[in-house]
Amino acid sequence: MTRTLVRDLDVATLVARRTPGYSLEAPFYTSSEIYDVDLDLIFGRHWIFVAAEAEIPEEGDYLTVDVGAQSVIVLRDDDCEVRAFRNICRHRGARLLDAGCGSVGNIVCPYHQWTYGTDGSLRFAEEQAEPFDKSQFGLRAVHAKTVAGLVYICLADEPPVDFDDVVAMIEPFLLPFDAKNAKVAHQTETIEDGNWKLVMENNRECHHCEANHPELTSAYFPFNRFAAHEVPVRQRPLFDRFQTAAAALDATCELASFPRGDRRELDTRVSGFQIQHLPLDGVGASYGSNGESLCSVLVSDRVDVKFGDFSLHTQPNAWFHFLGDHVTVFSALPVGVDKTLVRTTWLVHQDAVEGVDYNVDDLTLVWRSTNDEDRSLVERTQRGVTDPGYLPGRYSTVENDVESFVSWYIGRLAALLPGAN
Amino acid sequence: MTRTLVRDLDVATLVARRTPGYSLEAPFYTSSEIYDVDLDLIFGRHWIFVAAEAEIPEEGDYLTVDVGAQSVIVLRDDDCEVRAFRNICRHRGARLLDAGCGSVGNIVCPYHQWTYGTDGSLRFAEEQAEPFDKSQFGLRAVHAKTVAGLVYICLADEPPVDFDDVVAMIEPFLLPFDAKNAKVAHQTETIEDGNWKLVMENNRECHHCEANHPELTSAYFPFNRFAAHEVPVRQRPLFDRFQTAAAALDATCELASFPRGDRRELDTRVSGFQIQHLPLDGVGASYGSNGESLCSVLVSDRVDVKFGDFSLHTQPNAWFHFLGDHVTVFSALPVGVDKTLVRTTWLVHQDAVEGVDYNVDDLTLVWRSTNDEDRSLVERTQRGVTDPGYLPGRYSTVENDVESFVSWYIGRLAALLPGAN
Amino acid sequence: MTRTLVRDLDVATLVARRTPGYSLEAPFYTSSEIYDVDLDLIFGRHWIFVAAEAEIPEEGDYLTVDVGAQSVIVLRDDDCEVRAFRNICRHRGARLLDAGCGSVGNIVCPYHQWTYGTDGSLRFAEEQAEPFDKSQFGLRAVHAKTVAGLVYICLADEPPVDFDDVVAMIEPFLLPFDAKNAKVAHQTETIEDGNWKLVMENNRECHHCEANHPELTSAYFPFNRFAAHEVPVRQRPLFDRFQTAAAALDATCELASFPRGDRRELDTRVSGFQIQHLPLDGVGASYGSNGESLCSVLVSDRVDVKFGDFSLHTQPNAWFHFLGDHVTVFSALPVGVDKTLVRTTWLVHQDAVEGVDYNVDDLTLVWRSTNDEDRSLVERTQRGVTDPGYLPGRYSTVENDVESFVSWYIGRLAALLPGAN
């Protein structure tokens, strides 16, 4: 019962011997060395979702995002473009902007007042010996891209090139929700005491929902992956309702000229993703009781009040639910080997008025509850996989998106680890 | 004055160069690497005491025990046998039972409801692709053994075989106290900020008692290892009283047909142990003022009201005091390289009634105080040995059980370290 | 954008490739390995300032100082000499004296009462097997030296020999302030969440003062390193005032027979140091409003009421401001790789009466505020250099003492690292 210590095995060996269909070996969830690899090769080499554009609506608006120990400034420049920079002064390394968000004209380091424009250029630095080439001391740029109102960044020098193809595939579905012009109704940050992959694995299946998420499951039908003949007799009436709702959603989409067709490329490309469009139970509009709307102003005039749930998953760290009346966006960002930040942002139409058109408590109830329940499950799993007695276990048939997440992750490491082809 | 870093020395070298009669070198108390070795080779390969049977009196009763990062369920099965299992779901590794104790019919994982019987067998797991051999996914069993009401576990696949010999030697002494049928009067958990070996070393000598344990020393005679001719003149009256008490205890034991004869095999076998039977001062019954009883119901009808203190020490992590009116059991369990849990449980006869036959505050006073005083000493020592200026020091003549603990420990590492013969 | 991990580079390589004029690479501020090297080679091999003699005025007075995980007792022996010892019992390694200060006759270990004289000799140890040579078990001595009332210690077996030369150079300047016979008016301890070198670098420049230290900058002229022709037109009146104050200070020193002449040997010797004597603004006496005195009793009759600021910097860890009415002494002591204690002590003449001759709040305002502002800057910089996106930046022309600190540090490592010539 001797533990296998990760220092006895190189990461490449652990990657190579992963058994498909089984959860990962413990070091992937517990070793600092693999955590560093994850930050370098997963979060450092892929497009990661970090914010909604609606969080920085005006020129000069900024927010900071931490990816492990890295802090990135995401900012709307004077030309309205979203840019991203390392949040570090080029003089003596001081953190420039404190955590959070705000608005700036220039970015001025509090230490010795080095001053940068919102384009990252160094504009002012006192007492420098000549020659001093300011262009060598601008803020270090980070790649940033907006996708129908969602901000992705890539910390690599050379970002994955297939992301543009993904954008081309998903934008037609996302643009009708007009997230770019939405406003932020609410935002929460939850620290979960678990490795970021446990947070993602938990998100990638709803096998745990029935027993753990009473708020969420009342909105959804439990039949997503069922063929009609598999439905138990006692659930036939519910299944009939599901089929009626699915047909109604098809009709609604056709009327709205909204494209149909799920896409599932979770582990078959570098920038893995999935889109799905599901009917909701009851009225079928949103997460209110009996499926009622939670915001009386729709997100755009291109969607319908009973538009179900259009969801997007992107590897490695995000998921999204686009409903007719609001959009909820989620990012998971590693804080430590066993600590992950889940940031959740609720978007509504910019003209929706709090207290009139929507109520924050009601709007956010389902995902606030669900996030907290998930936090508890993730932490329970982190405790278990940290136990030297843990052995990888077999995924069930309804955990195939978990398997896809894990196989995407393992595939990416296999491709990017030094020495890999 | 350069420190010797443990990374510059392998553990085997440190083990090999230990000087008998001296405290250990600093890395044994401070290095994470040696802490991992301790968990693997000491706590992972020996029988360790974890609970009194009285803590889980009924079928389905369980408690969880943490040994480093490992959690073990100790449970009374439906056949009344005590069993132990890894506290980890075989599906995705979630911790099954939260820390503490309780009662279960089956063990159900809160994540996806995998369900195990109290015999560890997997009874239910949803949505599994066939073929699925449930017998391959039962809870991982841990060896468990009960010794006159004391529960020992062994995390190794092949537990030390000499433990049965030890049990055969000590059970005749322990059975008269009938701990198996006792009830728990009280339990405390103390976290000490010190390496587990400092906790044990502190327990293995009473050289520190006079200056630090006023409550404890009033119960005991300070003459345990003195020959008559060594007793200072000023202590002759006290020594005479000790000799009288010792003779009375001999007579009491003979009347009760209780075996006599201390055994000291602390470092001469794999499952090191020691038993001693000492008279108590004053009335000689228990830890009450002037040696009075603290529980009016004796632990069994096979012991006497003035039965002194029958003590048991077992390597690596336990000590016990069996008195006529109650039994106190102690386990030390590593939490981290510099953090140790001491769990103390007070047992009385199952018919004893709190508030009538005994009072918890009085019953537990001596060891609650003593534990807390010991915690302070252990923490003081951890601070010192963590200082790079620490050098091993020489044990005094009254610290021979400390030396035996340390030499047992070093001997076990020498035998079990990879590459050892 | 892959991080260079320190484990991939040995410390010697990092030392060898340091670029002069640039801040250090990140591992010098963030790696535990280099922190250990710093403790061994910088704090373990150089004279470090730890206390003012005035903190232990009487025989038997002691204080403890932590240098990393090492605790040192600094004590005034019965012969009035200041001595230093490892704060560890030679028996089982217990910490002897708890943190802080006090007064002792002997030093008695609370664990088993080993008793040491104030000269460190072992006087008493119970139950020792003969032969037992007490002289082998005295407290481990640490080199200690007093310099005009300042206590320096050296943890090395062989301290740097050039320190006596430094003492000979600086004592003529320091003795007139009579710190040896002063009394402690106040002491603060600030924990800064930054590497000790960031604390020192921050101390070694005032480029950050104008924007961050309003209290401090009102006392000083901003012209220290300016040549007359460099002063901007708008600052001519202020510069004229500075020149007048400088001339007045010269005259005052001549009257007081106080030596003139700054010495700057910050990175040109093992025991690097610097002394400077600067006029203060306004009345020119002290840090009061408009440069007024803060204590009505001068520190000695060898200084003048308008004596400006005589400052001393010593590598690696101290700085001092000697004013006519009080002396402020600062030590920076590493607590962890990213945690440093700054201890500040204010000294006044021993006859000065609190509430009559000085008021603690007023006396300490400038440096209490400045310390707290510096703490915030150091922590901001630690956050930045911990970010994998950090790159060393170029020092400005007014940061040459920072460069000297860093080049001294790099030079010392280069000389002392194993394998160095």
Image: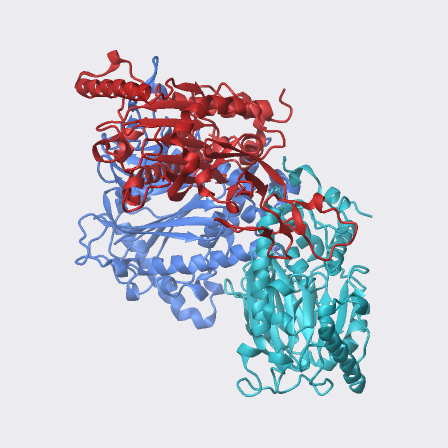
Chain colours: A cyan, B red, C blue
- Residue C183, given in percent of the width and then of the height, sits at 23, 47
C178 left or right, relative to C278 = left
Which quadrant would the N terminus of chain C be assigned to in this image? Answer: bottom right
- Pick whichever, B248 or C110, lies toward us: B248
A340 left or right, relative to A414 = left
- Residue B323, given in percent of the width and then of the height, sits at 33, 31
Q: How many marks?
A: 0
Q: Is residue A312 visible?
A: no
* Looking at the image, residue C170 lies above or below residue B12: below
* Looking at the image, residue B166 lies above or below residue B76: above
Which quadrant would the C terminus of chain C be assigned to in this image? Answer: top right
- Pick whichever, B320 or C282, lies toward us: B320
- Residue B6, given in percent of the width and then of the height, sits at 55, 32
- Residue A182, given in percent of the width and then of the height, sits at 64, 81
- Pick whichever, C335 or C161, lies toward us: C335
Q: Is residue A156 visible?
A: yes
* Looking at the image, residue A410 lies above or below residue B41: below
* Looking at the image, residue C64 lies above or below residue B162: below
